[in-house]
Image (tube, helix red, strand yellow):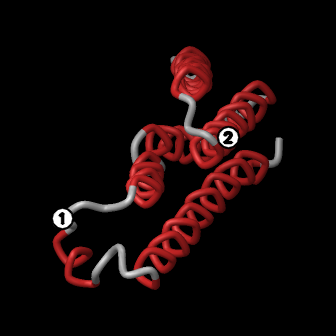
């Protein structure tokens, strides 16, 4: 099987992270223009920030939490000689869950929906790791 197939979902996650940076910067620019955030605040992240900006910042931080475990799994799958279609499917399902999670976060941030999608992505990633361990335990 072509090992590059496991790189595409990782690239999609990278795009989501880069998009999250852009959104956060645009929101920051908006509040700096409105003088609701001062440049000095950003230096040490001191003071009170608008909720929309804090939400975008938290979202960006989230891209360096659970997805890091995903990237490690992708690297291991890429380097193994045992890549399976289920690995590709699980990787894409995880990425889709992260995109939905991001959409919810930026749209209305309704915690029950966001939490459910997060849990689903978590379980998908866990299944991916279990499958990797079982498939490469020889």
Position of 120 with respect to 61 (left or right) is right
The image shows residue 44 at horizontal and vertical percentages of 16, 71
Using the image as rendered, state which of residue 32 and residue 68 is in the foreground: 32
Position of 32 with respect to 131 (left or right) is left
Position of 37 with respect to 113 (left or right) is left
| Residue occupied by mark 1 | 47
Label 1 and label 2: CA atoms lie apart by 34 Å
The reply to whether residue 16 is visible in this rendering is yes
Q: Residue at x 44, y 74 (%)?
A: 31
Residue 36 quadrant: bottom left
Using the image as rendered, state which of residue 13 and residue 79 is in the foreground: 13
Q: Residue at x 61, y 37 (%)?
A: 101
| Residue occupied by mark 2 | 95
Foreground mark, 1 or 2? 1
Using the image as rendered, state which of residue 67 and residue 55 is in the foreground: 55
- Using the image, determine if residue 10 lies above or below residue 28: above
Question: Please, what secondary structure does the residue beneath circle 1 have?
Answer: loop
Q: Is mark 1 in CB contact (under 8 Å) with mark 2?
A: no
The image shows residue 32 at horizontal and vertical percentages of 40, 81
- Using the image, determine if residue 67 lies above or below residue 115: below
- Using the image, determine if residue 100 lies above or below residue 106: above
- Using the image, determine if residue 43 lies above or below residue 107: below
The image shows residue 61 at horizontal and vertical percentages of 39, 52
Question: Please, what secondary structure does the residue beneath circle 2 have?
Answer: helix
Q: Earlier in the sequence, mark 1 or mark 2?
A: 1
Position of 51 with respect to 90 (left or right) is left
Q: Residue at x 61, y 40 (%)?
A: 108
The image shows residue 67 at horizontal and vertical percentages of 50, 43
Local crowd at mark 1 within 10 Å, few (<14), some, or many (≥20)? Answer: few
- Label at residue 120: none
Local crowd at mark 2 within 10 Å, few (<14), some, or many (≥20)? Answer: many
């Amino acid at each position: 099987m072509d090992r590059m197939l496991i790189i595409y979902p990782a690239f999609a996650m990278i795009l989501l992270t880069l998009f999250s940076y852009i959104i956060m910067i645009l929101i920051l620019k908006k509040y700096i223009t409105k003088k609701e955030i001062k440049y000095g605040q950003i230096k040490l992240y001191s003071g009170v920030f608008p909720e929309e900006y804090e939400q975008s910042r938290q979202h960006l931080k989230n891209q360096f939490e659970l997805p890091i475990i995903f990237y490690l799994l992708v690297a291991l799958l890429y380097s193994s000689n045992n890549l399976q279609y289920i690995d590709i499917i699980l990787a894409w399902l995880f990425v889709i869950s992260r995109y939905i999670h991001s959409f919810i976060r930026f749209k209305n941030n309704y915690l029950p929906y966001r939490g459910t999608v997060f849990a689903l992505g978590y379980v998908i990633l866990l299944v991916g790791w279990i499958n990797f361990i079982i498939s490469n335990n020889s």
